[in-house]
Image: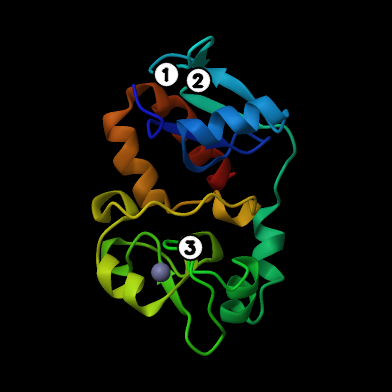
Amino acid sequence: MSLNRKVLLLNASYEALGVVAAARAVRLVWKGAAQPVEYTGGCVLRSQHYAFIVPSVVRLVEYIDLRRRRAQSGKQRIHILVRDKMRCQYCGVRGTIFDLTLDHIMPRSRGGRSEPENLCAACKPCNQRKGDRTPDEARMPLLASPSALRYGLDRALLRHYAAQRPEWRPYLFLAEESEVA
Ligand SMILES: [Zn+2]
């Protein structure tokens, strides 16, 4: 059982926001920022003295208003570079607005949208190395970041995960219904 086992992250409204690594989900629950929702399909993290049952779905305690955050991002490129603290989100190197690029976390060629939660600051070498692959495929995990905007991943990626994680499906359906409403 690995720290990289994925956990579905829901907004306080139960809308699916994206997926996070098990270790990140554990930190969110431990800090009180999220609550476990579903244990089916979860895993157990063990240290020398503790065993922690990792949920497969967690829900944020505080609601994140993604739409309002999107509306506020007029100058999207600068906004995202500032959000990511002018650091490449893959290797951590510090850059400037002149040499950092924006990377589509889920590539555009795969249905990834040009929305803040699917964009991150990347240095040119990392952007080229990643190419048209997801972070998982490229083995280039995103740096952990406290930014709420980072949680969201493209719905295409959620569907991809849902195919492998049947226990997530009820939550993903619920999110789709709330989008229509
Ligand atoms: Zn980099």
**Vertical order, 46 against 68 (above or below):** above
Q: Which image quarter is the N terminus in?
A: top left
Displayed quadrant of residue 50: top right
Where disc 2 sits, the SS reads loop
Q: Does the image show residue 174?
A: no
User: Mark 2 near ligand 1 (CB under 8 Å)?
Assistant: no
Is the image coloured rainbow, by chain, by secondary structure, or in one colour?
Answer: rainbow
Q: Does the image show residue 113?
A: yes
Q: Position of residue 157 (x, y in %)?
A: 35, 48
**Vertical order, 173 against 65 (above or below):** above
Q: Amino acid at mark 3?
A: Gln
Label 1, on which residue? 42
Alpha carbon distance from label 3 to label 2:
26 Å
Label 2, on which residue? 55
Task: Judge left or right: residue 132 versus residue 43.
Answer: left
Question: Residue at (26%, 56%) from the top-left corner?
Answer: 138
Q: Which mark is residue 136?
A: none
Task: Judge left or right: residue 50 versus residue 169.
Answer: right
Q: Position of residue 125 (x, y in %)?
A: 33, 76
Q: Which image quarter is the C terminus in?
A: top right
Alpha carbon distance from label 1 to label 3:
27 Å
Where disc 3 sits, the SS reads loop
Displayed quadrant of residue 73: bottom right
Label 3, on which residue? 89
**Vertical order, 120 against 25 (above or below):** below
Label 3 or label 2, whichever comes before in sequence order: 2
Cβ atoms at labels 2 and 1 below 8 Å apart = yes
